Amino acid sequence: MNWLNKLPGSKRSASGLEWRLWRRLPLIFAVGTAVPLVVALGLHWLVPGQDSAQQRWLQLLDYCVIGVLLCHWTAVLTAAIGCVVVMLMKGPGYVADAMELSDSERPRRRAEPGAPGAL
């Protein structure tokens, strides 16, 4: 059973920015994850956390890094979903089920009063 049939005469559109971005997403993800982590780890290593004010500041930094990472991961995921959607939309056209419209070319006649289906 063939679920999807290509529409006759449909063509693929030329690829564009979506494929270039799709190929760079792993690098963007890795760099965007590594930079905040390296900065946070470097500050944890450089700042001696003996004082309670410094410990509070470092904990606030940790929360900010977590927020930046979650925001970055969400942005990368959103870009990936957008790339996939554009790739699918640029592909060949498919048809699953043909749906006949009852009144697409000719107007539907109004039912007579008292006939079945009349309002």
Image (cartoon, rainbow, N blue to C red):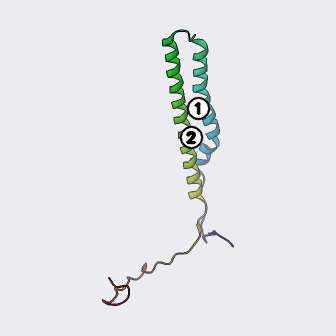
The residue positioned 50% from the left and 78% from the top of the image is: 100
User: What type is the residue that disc 2 sits on?
Assistant: Val
**Above or below, comparing residue 97 to residue 69 in the picture:** below
Indicate left or right for 26 with 85 as reference.
right
How far is the residue under mark 2 from the one under mark 1? Answer: 9 Å
Q: Position of residue 42 (x, y in %)?
A: 60, 17
User: What type is the residue that disc 1 sits on?
Assistant: Gly
Indicate left or right for 53 with 33 as reference.
left
**Residue reaching furthest to the right:** 1
User: Label 1's element?
Assistant: helix
Question: Which disc, if any, is residue 76?
Answer: 2
Q: In the rendered view of the protein, which quadrant contains the C terminus?
A: bottom left
- Name the image quarter holding residue 3: bottom right
- Name the image quarter holding residue 22: top right
**Above or below, comparing residue 1 to residue 117 in the picture:** above
Residue behind mark 1: 32
Indicate left or right for 119 with 57 as reference.
left
The residue positioned 62% from the left and 47% from the top of the image is: 19
**Above or below, comparing residue 87 to residue 117 in the picture:** above
Q: Position of residue 16 (x, y in %)?
A: 58, 49
Q: Position of residue 84 (x, y in %)?
A: 59, 51
Q: In the rendered view of the protein, which quadrant contains the N terminus?
A: bottom right
Cβ–Cβ below 8 Å for labels 2 and 1? yes
Question: Which disc, if any, is residue 110?
Answer: none
